[in-house]
Image: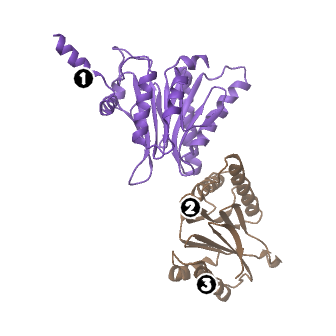
Chain colours: A purple, B brown
Amino acid sequence: MEAISHAGTVLGVLAKDGVVLAAEKKVTGKLLDLSSSKEGGYGGSGEKIFLLNSNVIGGVAGLTADANSLVNYCRSAAQKHLLTYNEDIPVELLAQRLCDLKQGYTQYGGLRPFGVSILYAGYDAHYNFQLYHSDPSGNYSGWKATCIGANSGTAQSLLKQEYKDDITVKDAVGLVLRTMSKTMDSTTLGSEKLEFAVLTLDPETGAPRAKIYRPHEIDALLLSEGLTKKDEDKDAEMKST
Amino acid sequence: METSFALTGKGYVLIAADTTAARSIVKMKVDEDKIKALGPHLLMAYSGEPGDTVQFAEYVERNIRLYQIRNTYSLRPSAAASWVRRSLAESIRSRHPYSVNLLLGGYDVASHDPHLYWIDYLGTIAEVPFAAHGYGSYFALSLLDRYHKPDASLEEGVETLKRCIAEVAKRLVVSPGTYKVKVVDKDGVREIEI
């Protein structure tokens, strides 16, 4: 639990037509090779936000190695369900599977628990869009908006004030980004330190669509929300020279 | 010989199975129920090897119920059908396969429509508007081809079913005397008199 309170923040907000997840990256720097997140795969740098199944995305906070192991287990569990039942695993069920595993490590074998908290954002036909949070003990609960990791308390109270029950995805995106900018360590928001993902329904097929944003898409999004300070910096530079 | 038919209509699935339990030349019982309710909106008619049938049907029923109890909501008909199919597909290549043929009918409460699945002992599955198992299927299927309407009311569906039953009674050498008929719709599972 200590490790998690020092880890990068992960924020999730449930809207009536989708779910939004954002995370602060801790592993950054000029020398970091980000080519895989820019071109290949499905977006995300593989540090905070992961695609767990076509209808669920997960955001992790805590020990990275533990998190990777859990994400892998999650993905296997989701596919196992697909194999047996030929349907996408219901979100709560996926959270339960992972929590059963986490709980096992607190009771059997003399092994240490997984030091990871996870936010699950997903869609299923039973309960539509859902957001769940699980912690190392194996407890989970459903949320309308929640936060894990560093400064989660501040973020949680900010969300409590601003969240409205029938919020749309568009407004949720704005809410998430504004809250992130207030709780993150760095002064400016940028694609270097931010991971962002949205889960909505495809308007034609009605199937869930997970979109994990690539760095340039995050930059464009921040620009449209008016949260980048890059223009001001450039103006300041030009004025000084 | 064991006969079962099923058809879908506007918001319902109708399943009928004969009620004769016989061994060789002897009729042991004429009021056997061969249609199991697997859940609040799921019905399954079984036929095949005696012993295997009830064993497998009970196994399916208990597992479906376990899922429902564990997970607050019940399996949708398509998911239940996939699970049953996989069980049979694994069984066929085991030391002693289950020799059971099934008709699985259910009402999907999430998407508000009825579904019917024809499943055989090999693990073949087909989602169909109407289906039949047994020797009676040779007569029933042609009639259903001709008279089935996908959006028929329950009364019309029952009329079509009665035609099938009459034809089997007329033409099959050892035809069953009585049938049990059950329907599943948004209100759940119930038996109907015909």
Extreme residue in the top direction: A241
Identify the mark nearer the N-term, 2 or 3: 2
Separation of marks 1 and 2 at Cα, in angstroms: 61 Å
Instruction: Give the quadrant of residue A192.
Output: top left
Q: Residue at x 54, y 64 (%)?
A: B126
Q: Residue at x 43, y 34 (%)?
A: A175
In this view, the mark in front (2 or 3): 3
Q: Where is mark 3, residue-wise?
A: B159
Q: Residue at x 66, y 30 (%)?
A: A138
Separation of marks 2 and 3 at Cα, in angstroms: 27 Å
Count neighbours of disc 2 (C-alpha within 10 A) and say few if under 14, some if 14 to 19, many if 20 or more.
some
Instruction: Give the quadrant of residue A99.
Output: top right
Q: As rendered, which of B186 and A163 lies closer to the eye?
A: A163
Q: Is residue A144 visible?
A: yes
The chain under label 1 reads: A
Extreme residue in the left direction: A241
Q: Quadrant of the N terminus of chain A?
A: top right
In this view, the mark in front (1 or 2): 1
Q: Is residue A46 visible?
A: no
Residue A156 in picture, x, y percent from top left? 54, 28
Q: Residue at x 55, y 21 (%)?
A: A62
> Which amino acid is tagged 2?
Ile
Compared to A205, does B150 lie above or below?
A: below
For residue B125, which numbered disc appears in the image? Answer: 2
Residue A17 in picture, x, y percent from top left? 45, 47
Q: Secondary structure at mark 1?
A: helix
A129 left or right of B167 in image: left
> Which amino acid is tagged 3?
Glu
For residue A231, which numbered disc appears in the image? Answer: 1
